[in-house]
Amino acid sequence: MKRLRKLLLLNVIGIVLIIYNTIPDYRTNRNTFPHLQSTTPFRDSTDKGGFPDVIVIGVEGCGNTVMMNFLNATGYFQVPNRTTYSSDFFTGNWERGEEWYRSLFTQENGQRITIENSPHYFYAYPPTIPQKMLTLNPNMKVILQLCDPIQRAFSCYVHNHKHYTPNIAGAFAEYARVHLLQLQGELNTKIDFHHQERHVLSKWNSRNRCIQAGLYVYHLERWQKSFNHSRMLILDGDDMIREPWTSYAKIQDFLEMPKLIHKEDWVLNNKTGQYCLKPSSRIPKPPLCVQPKSTDIQQPKEEIISAFTTFYKPYNEELFKILGYRYPWQ
Ligand SMILES: *[C@@H]1O[C@H](CO)[C@@H](O)[C@H](O)[C@H]1NC(C)=O
Ligand SMILES: *[C@@H]1O[C@H](CO)[C@@H](O)[C@H](O)[C@H]1NC(C)=O
Ligand SMILES: *[C@@H]1O[C@H](CO)[C@@H](O)[C@H](O)[C@H]1NC(C)=O
Ligand SMILES: *[C@@H]1O[C@H](CO)[C@@H](O)[C@H](O)[C@H]1NC(C)=O
């Protein structure tokens, strides 16, 4: 009887090992699925369309749509054949299937780069989104734009509530009072990083969403397991406003594309303080300017900012350590 149990146990260990060994490790070998390249080509010469070469994965509220407008204006990109740049394929539209996804990119493509922007992917459920992307296109690249998580949380809240909340700063303060404490309490009970990460991820569609999305360090780990430095570009959303040419130079290098947006194309609008792209032979009809300023919205109170600063600080510090770069957030 004892021996049987021992055998069973060894068997179970054996099976676990076998299963473990068949889980592809994207970190060490990106081409674990060479057979998929032939059965599900990510570039199809027929009219079925292709999977994207690059996906902007976030973060919502850090100026990704504006960035997409400038990239789209170069004419060098193929964007989804929809009214927005997003597909939400790996979240809400997964059930529609791969054919649907490919059909978004059926326009004439020539040498153009296929791109889409679904900026909640960065913090969205399920945790397997990065692996799923690479299964469809093993050469996939991702762009992530980060910005001050406090401002981001506020603009997320405003975005969701402005139509029916007149005192938006007051409502945000109330929201913060309840949810900051709650999230902090929940994180404190999940002692190790992995449990906290899972917990934060499980909240992506909850009322905490505006706050938990800003716990960047938890989400980043997950993406870096699948996308190494050569496949993941991380941008500073504030640069995009202060000196947009540096961000576009990085994007053009990262995507190994012609330099279509130059530093000297940007002019400062003295009235609004925004940078605008002037028409050139490369981009005859540019979209107007970087991030429009919203002056009509009250800003959150000082005490709320300070509560958020305390809350995010340890997570930001951990993030800066991983990135080897300090963002200018307080
Ligand atoms: C992208 O650019 C094309 C060509 O200018 C335009 O027709 C299309 O509406 C733009 N896409 C979006 C989502 O704005
Ligand atoms: C976009 O898709 C619709 C139907 O799926 C098609 O009729 C239309 O021609 C497409 N537009 C472009 C620019 O490919
Ligand atoms: C990243 O991935 C590429 C392509 O698989 C590989 O050549 C490169 O060595 C990797 N770089 C790092 C830093 O792991
Ligand atoms: C903006 O201000 C600078 C310096 O004050 C001035 O030289 C320039 O002509 C102004 N540009 C416009 C478009 O008003």
Image (tube, rainbow, N blue to C red):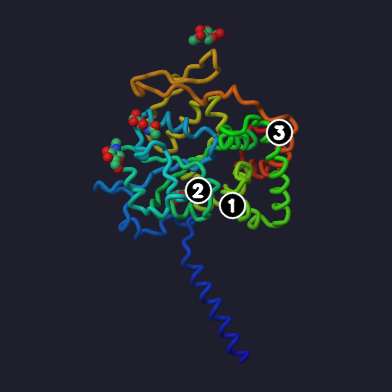
Name the residue that disc number 3 marks.
305
- Residue 34 to residue 13: above or below: above
> For the residues marked 3 and 2, what is the alpha-carbon distance in whole angstroms?
34 Å
User: Which percent across, then down, holds residue 222?
Assistant: 55, 52
Tell me which residue sits at (63%, 54%) in the image: 199
Element at label 1: helix
**Left or right of 50, for residue 308:** right
**Left or right of 298, for residue 160:** left
Tell me which residue sits at (42%, 53%) in the image: 94
> For the residues marked 3 and 1, what is the alpha-carbon distance in whole angstroms?
24 Å
Task: Name which residue type carries label 1.
Answer: Leu
Q: State the mark number for residue 257.
A: none
From the Cβ of disc 2, is ligand 3 less than 8 Å away? Answer: yes
Residue 328, quarter of picture: top right
Task: Name which residue type carries label 2.
Answer: Asn
Numbered disc in front, either 1 or 2: 1
Question: Are the residues flagged by discs 3 and 2 in contact, CB closer than 8 Å?
Answer: no
Q: Residues within 10 Å of mark 3 (few under 14, many from 20)?
A: some
Q: Is residue 280 visible?
A: yes
**Left or right of 219, for residue 135:** left
Q: State the mark number for residue 201.
A: 1
Residue 270, quarter of picture: top right
Quadrant location of the N terminus in the rendered image: bottom right
Question: Are the residues flagged by discs 1 and 2 in contact, CB closer than 8 Å?
Answer: no
Marks 3 and 1, the one that precedes in the sequence: 1
Numbered disc in front, either 3 or 2: 3
Task: Name which residue type carries label 3.
Answer: Ile
